[in-house]
Image (cartoon, helix red, strand yellow):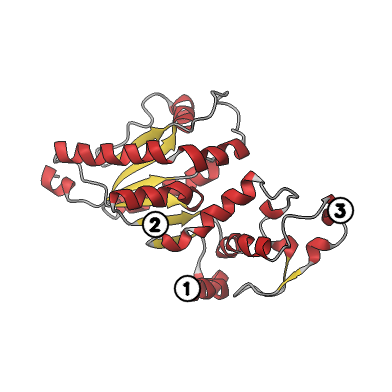
Amino acid sequence: MGSTEVATKPHAVCIPAPAQSHIKAMLKFAKLLHHRGFHITFVNTEFNHKRFLKSLGSNSLDGLADFRFEAIPDSLPDSNEDTTQDVTLLAESVRKNFLAPFHALLLKLNNDAIEASSNPTVTCIVSDGFMSTFTIKAAEEIGAPIVLFNTIAACSFMGFTQLRAVVEKGLVPLKDESCFTNGYLDTVIDWIPGMRDIRLRDLPTFFRTTNPDDVMLNFIMESTDRAHDASAVVLHTFDALESDVLDALSVGE
């Protein structure tokens, strides 16, 4: 393949949420894009990048000429690579610390493309939906379209989009811990398009807190608030399974 042909290939920068299941799903999606002719840059956190190298060997992420791996810092204290990182601390860091290094990486990739004509410039970003708190901003700053890849079903995504509404309606945060056992979670939620017979307990469990400043609740709400700013949203589902919800989401767009 000539350098001119490589340089004109579409270049997708894929960045998963830094959790095992999200990384695996994004990697499979990136492989499909690569198979369809995309140049891929796959971005892990340094913590997870090191875990891959430790598990699979020092050359395991050398990649191909058109499928490369990069890493950005997560700004968390060093921890044992054999343990799972604290999800709450990680979510807080995603909100506050990931934009600058990710934006710097995008600029580096584009500068490298200018200096070496065999590499294409970034043409789009494929971001995990839970990373949108910074990836949409980064995409706007370099003028690239962004696709949010949600590694969840359509009903889960719809549930996440409703968390802001249940807060605004005063249903969440919970008044006290008795709400977990006194039947409060059976409160009917009848306004969600495409989802009938839903109770409060059927929504994603991140709302189950008595703290209005709960990190995970606010992280999820901020992530879904900006979904409509993406060029496209990909959901891990198929139409025959969740047609009602998918139709409702399409109308909402």
CB contact under 8 Å: marks 1 and 2? no
| 113 or 139: nearer the viewer | 139
- Residue 42 position within the rendered picture, expressed as x and y whole percent measured from the top left: 37, 41
- Residue 240 position within the rendered picture, expressed as x and y whole percent measured from the top left: 53, 72
Q: Secondary structure at mark 2?
A: strand
Q: Earlier in the sequence, mark 1 or mark 2?
A: 2
Badge 3 density bin: few <14, some 14–19, many ≥20, Cα 10 Å? few
The type of residue carrying mark 3 is Ser
Which disc number belongs to residue 15?
A: none
Badge 2 density bin: few <14, some 14–19, many ≥20, Cα 10 Å? many
The number of numbered discs placed on residues in the rendered structure image is 3
Question: Is 103 positioned to the left or the right of 235 in the image?
Answer: left
Residue under pointer 3: 178
Q: Earlier in the sequence, mark 3 or mark 2?
A: 2
Question: Is 213 positioned to the left or the right of 229 in the image?
Answer: right
Q: The N terminus lies in which quarter of the figure?
A: top left
- Nearer the observer: mark 3 or 2; the answer is 3
CB contact under 8 Å: marks 1 and 3? no
The type of residue carrying mark 1 is Ser
Question: Is 204 positioned to the left or the right of 142 in the image?
Answer: right
Residue under pointer 1: 250
Question: Alpha-carbon distance for marks 1 and 2?
Answer: 15 Å
- Residue 38 position within the rendered picture, expressed as x and y whole percent measured from the top left: 28, 51
Residue under pointer 2: 147
